[in-house]
Image (cartoon, coloured by chain):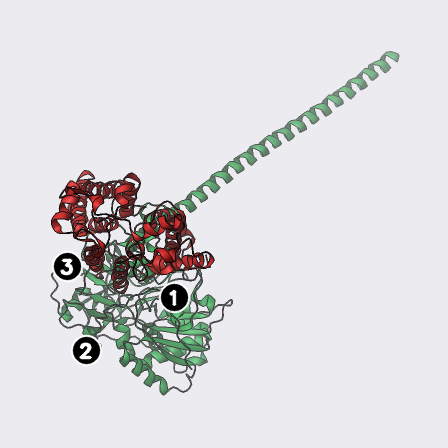
Chain colours: A red, B green
């Protein structure tokens, strides 16, 4: 006996929230492997810890809010938030930072606004920004890529550094170093020319050593998501083009204040942001034109913060600032309805 | 000759599932013992019965007449005796009953005298429309709007194009497909009459490319009618909802019907091939509309196919004829799987708008608990009207009906594409129907209260006017009284003076 809903349509497509979230996680796998290759197992420890904390927090919040556990725990959205946050923070972040960031993201940025579908801001980025403004030191101490490191990073050392803060009597600072974006920014302030800076060992062909490959893998994962129709091309393309255009213009006018356009595309969180963070449907724009405006806004703000702001990378702030504009963007970018006058 | 096709935004490629019901020819459903004919099988006013219980009727005899302008007649689908005129369950999603005429058939299936018109061009368009109206013809695509109205260009419009909508885009349904395959000539008969009645210059017969047999049959039939040089068959890509009137117009002519306007406002009139066929039968053969082709299909139907079925035939008889694995009281779908509605109970008659009876769907939508909207925008991507269903949902849910109108709720054609793709399985169309109904109710209430207020205000005005008039009358009367009094007093005065003068004179005397 077929049991169907009482109202049409009686046909259902295969699209499911859970399926979309799972595909996002799958698309992140190549980049996670690349990050582990360049920065050691700390990346995987962060991801595991973040996902565990996210699921526990999600379950607790659902319980507190009297929501059914199964449909919401299995939708995969908490895991996606956790993984994105874990990939955005330094690979040897102390465990409590991960816990604070993820908990804040799930509790404050998601559930206090009403849970899945109701959060105006990207939860992962809210968690990230909280950590960035609260613990600036820890958040800016990244690792050099493994090939440049004095000490190779193993599972034991990563675990001990994350959970106890030291290994063999050495603290995290013994291992850590600035990111290429950070190095670029501080050395430009010291009147070094970007071309000279990028000839240093920590820089690769175009972006930071290792970072460029990580960005490429994020981009490839994202392109697969577009191919799978999980995300649309509008936001990533708009963000990348906007970043490319504004950095090209700046470089043409004054090449001493900014790294090359390609450096900006392949450094820091550009591709992670373009394909995985700015494409969050809940906190982003829903109209096609709106998505282009939104993506372009994120790209421009990212660059502005990187060059003229106080932080080496600007993706998180850019996304949150554009999140605020979403209702406005959506309102003014409504498509022309069939038979209707142009808006 | 054929111009490049237009396109509409969104839409879906759906699995057709049409093969199941197109394996054999159209078969005739046996005459049921009892036929139940709802008086309202069309949009507009219900027909008024002109027979009484106990009357003997012949096949094709008129049993109810059109009431008012937007209405059509109703005919006995077979010969027999009227056994009841009263409420009976009708195939409507509400499950309500409505006035019906019940005929006990005698099995003789004896026709009335049929008035055949050999050369319809000898008649005026008005006469033809009247015959079409008297024949009870309504749009057989599913909406059931009286066809004679849509064959009247009126004085303010001129119709350039008659568009025959043979797209039949909804999965499972194949009644138009089979009709075009088997009765292409009959359809063209109707097309000629429609072109004549509309004074239209050309006809486009649009068929989706998943119906090669129908396309071939129509092309063949058309090739032998050289005088139909302005009629062309346009093959359109198979995509749901191409068969939506507005969407098809956009595909075929690249024009859009402006909001709150009708296709006729841009010189186009759209009819279903089944309607064209019925028009041909009515004019050339004198047969009123008493049957239609119904697709019976679905995973639970053993002998799926298309059946020429008399109106009033109980659906259970039709299903029994096709043999189904359906349990008694199991719900089934009338119409397609995207826009049809589920019916419970099968003691319901086949009506003029019943194009398909669907028992069992392949990719059935289970009654799932919807998740919250994640604003993914997939719904907007597939919306053929370029609406923003997620915004409409948001405002419908919040009962913010002003905002829903601002987001063009009434341009929604309820095709169900948004529901189909929604990853959260939200019944979006149900929300939109709810919002539309609420707005229309509010409007009706507002209209009613406006009328009441006007009535109240005019009453107050009248009372005041009456009071004023009364006062005025009183004032006048008082004034008149005062005047007469004054006059009297004057008179008395003068009398007095006269008397006084008299007495003086008397004294003097």
- The mark closer to the camera, 1 or 3, is 1
Quarter of the picture containing the N terminus of chain B is bottom left
| Tag shown at residue B246 | 1
Q: Tell me whether marks 1 and 3 sit on the same chain.
A: yes
Count of marks, rendered view: 3
Residue at left offset 68%, top offset 25%: B482
Disc 3 crowd, CA 10 A, few/some/many (<14, 14-19, 20+)? some
Residue A234 makes an appearance in the image:
no
| Tag shown at residue B279 | none
The Cα atoms of the two marked residues, 1 and 3, are separated by 35 Å
* Dot placed on the residue nearer the N-terminal end, 3 or 2: 2
- Look at the numbered disc 2 and give the secondary structure of its residue: loop
What x and y, as percent, mark residue B364?
18, 61
* Dot placed on the residue nearer the N-terminal end, 1 or 3: 1
Residue underneath mark 3: B330
Quarter of the picture containing the C terminus of chain B is top right
Q: Is residue B484 left or right of residue B294?
A: right
The Cα atoms of the two marked residues, 3 and 2, are separated by 26 Å
Q: Tell me whether marks 1 and 2 sit on the same chain.
A: yes
Front residue of B416/B422: it is B422
The chain containing the residue under callout 3 comes to B
What x and y, as percent, mark residue B274?
31, 73
* Dot placed on the residue nearer the N-terminal end, 1 or 2: 2
Residue underneath mark 2: B23
The chain containing the residue under callout 1 comes to B
The Cα atoms of the two marked residues, 1 and 2, are separated by 31 Å
- The mark closer to the camera, 1 or 2, is 1
- Look at the numbered disc 3 and give the secondary structure of its residue: loop
Residue B203 makes an appearance in the image:
yes
The chain containing the residue under callout 2 comes to B
Residue B121 sits in quarter: bottom left
């Amino acid at each position: 006996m077929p049991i169907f809903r009482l109202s049409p349509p009686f046909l259902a497509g295969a699209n499911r929230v859970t399926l979309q979230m799972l595909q996002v996680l799958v698309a992140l796998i190549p980049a996670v492997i690349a990050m582990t290759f360049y920065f050691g197992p700390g990346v995987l420890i962060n991801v595991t810890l973040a996902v565990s904390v996210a699921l526990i927090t999600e379950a607790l919040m659902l319980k507190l809010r009297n929501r059914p556990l199964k449909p919401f725990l299995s939708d995969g959205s908490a895991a996606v938030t956790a993984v994105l946050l874990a990939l955005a923070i330094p690979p040897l972040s102390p465990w409590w930072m991960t816990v604070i960031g993820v908990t804040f993201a799930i509790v404050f940025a998601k559930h206090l606004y009403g849970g899945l579908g109701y959060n105006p801001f990207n939860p992962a980025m809210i968690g990230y920004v909280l950590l960035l403004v609260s613990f600036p030191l820890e958040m800016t101490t990244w690792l050099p890529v493994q090939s440049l490191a004095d000490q190779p990073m193993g599972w034991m050392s990563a675990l001990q550094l994350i959970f106890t803060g030291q290994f063999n009597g050495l603290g995290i600072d013994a291992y850590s170093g600035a990111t290429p974006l950070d190095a670029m920014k501080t050395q430009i302030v010291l009147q070094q020319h970007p071309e000279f800076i990028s000839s240093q060992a920590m820089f690769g062909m175009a972006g930071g050593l290792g970072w460029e490959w990580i960005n490429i893998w994020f981009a490839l994962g994202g392109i697969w998501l577009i191919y799978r129709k999980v995300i649309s091309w509008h936001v990533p393309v708009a963000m990348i083009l906007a970043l490319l255009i504004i950095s090209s213009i700046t470089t043409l006018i004054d090449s001493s204040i900014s790294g090359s356009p390609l450096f900006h595309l392949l450094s820091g969180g550009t591709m992670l942001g373009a394909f995985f963070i700015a494409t969050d449907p809940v906190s982003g724009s829903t109209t096609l034109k709106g998505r282009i405006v939104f993506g372009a806004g994120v790209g421009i703000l990212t660059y502005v913060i990187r060059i003229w702001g106080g932080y080496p990378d600007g993706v998180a702030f850019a996304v949150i600032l554009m999140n605020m504009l979403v209702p406005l963007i959506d309102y003014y970018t409504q498509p022309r309805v069939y038979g209707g006058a142009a808006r | 000759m054929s111009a490049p096709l237009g396109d509409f935004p969104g839409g879906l490629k759906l699995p057709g599932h049409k093969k199941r019901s197109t394996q054999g020819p159209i078969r005739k459903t046996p005459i049921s013992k009892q036929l139940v004919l709802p008086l309202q099988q069309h949009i507009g006013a219900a027909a008024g019965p002109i027979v009484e219980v106990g009357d003997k009727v012949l096949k094709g005899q008129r049993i109810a007449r059109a009431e008012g302008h937007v209405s059509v007649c109703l005919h006995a689908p077979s010969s027999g005796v009227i056994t009841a005129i009263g409420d009976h369950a009708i195939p409507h999603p509400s499950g309500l009953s409505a006035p019906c005429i019940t005929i006990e058939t005698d099995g003789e299936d004896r026709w009335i005298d049929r008035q055949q018109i050999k050369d319809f061009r000898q008649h005026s368009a008005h006469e033809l429309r009247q015959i079409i109206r008297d024949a009870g013809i309504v749009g057989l695509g599913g909406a059931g709007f009286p066809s004679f109205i849509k064959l009247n260009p009126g004085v303010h419009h001129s119709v350039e194009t008659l568009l025959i909508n043979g797209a039949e885009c909804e999965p499972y349904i194949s009644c138009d497909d089979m009709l075009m395959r088997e009765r292409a000539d009959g359809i063209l008969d109707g097309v000629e009459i429609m072109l004549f009645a509309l004074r239209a210059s050309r006809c486009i017969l649009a068929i989706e490319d998943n119906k090669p047999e129908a396309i071939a049959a129509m092309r063949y039939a058309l090739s032998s009618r050289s005088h139909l040089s302005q009629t062309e068959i346009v093959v359109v890509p198979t995509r749901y909802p191409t068969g939506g009137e507005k969407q098809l117009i956009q595909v075929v002519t690249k024009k859009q019907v402006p909001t709150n306007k009708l296709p006729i406002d841009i010189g186009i009139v759209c009819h279903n091939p089944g309607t064209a066929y019925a028009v041909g039968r009515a004019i050339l053969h004198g047969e009123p509309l008493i049957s239609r082709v119904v697709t019976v299909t679905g995973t639970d139907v053993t002998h799926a196919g298309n059946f020429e079925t008399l109106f009033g035939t109980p659906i259970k008889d039709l299903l029994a004829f096709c043999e189904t694995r359906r349990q008694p009281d199991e719900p089934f779908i009338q119409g397609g799987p995207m826009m049809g509605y589920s019916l419970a109970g099968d003691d319901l008659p086949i009506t003029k708008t019943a194009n398909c009876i669907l028992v069992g769907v392949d990719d059935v939508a289970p009654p799932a608990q919807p998740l919250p909207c994640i604003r993914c925008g997939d719904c907007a991507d597939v919306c053929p009207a370029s609406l923003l269903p997620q915004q409409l949902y948001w405002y419908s849910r919040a009962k913010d009906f002003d905002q829903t109108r601002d987001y063009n709720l009434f341009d929604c054609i309820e095709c169900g594409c948004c529901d189909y793709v929604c990853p959260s399985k939200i019944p979006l169309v149900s929300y939109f129907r709810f919002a539309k109904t609420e707005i229309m109710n509010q409007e009706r209430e507002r209209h009613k209260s406006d009328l009441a207020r006007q009535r109240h205000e005019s009453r107050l005005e009248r009372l005041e006017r009456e009071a004023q008039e009364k006062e005025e009358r009183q004032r006048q009367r008082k004034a008149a009284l005062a005047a007469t009094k004054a006059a009297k007093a004057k008179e008395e005065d003068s009398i007095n003076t006269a008397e006084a003068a008299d007495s003086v004179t008397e004294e003097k005397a």
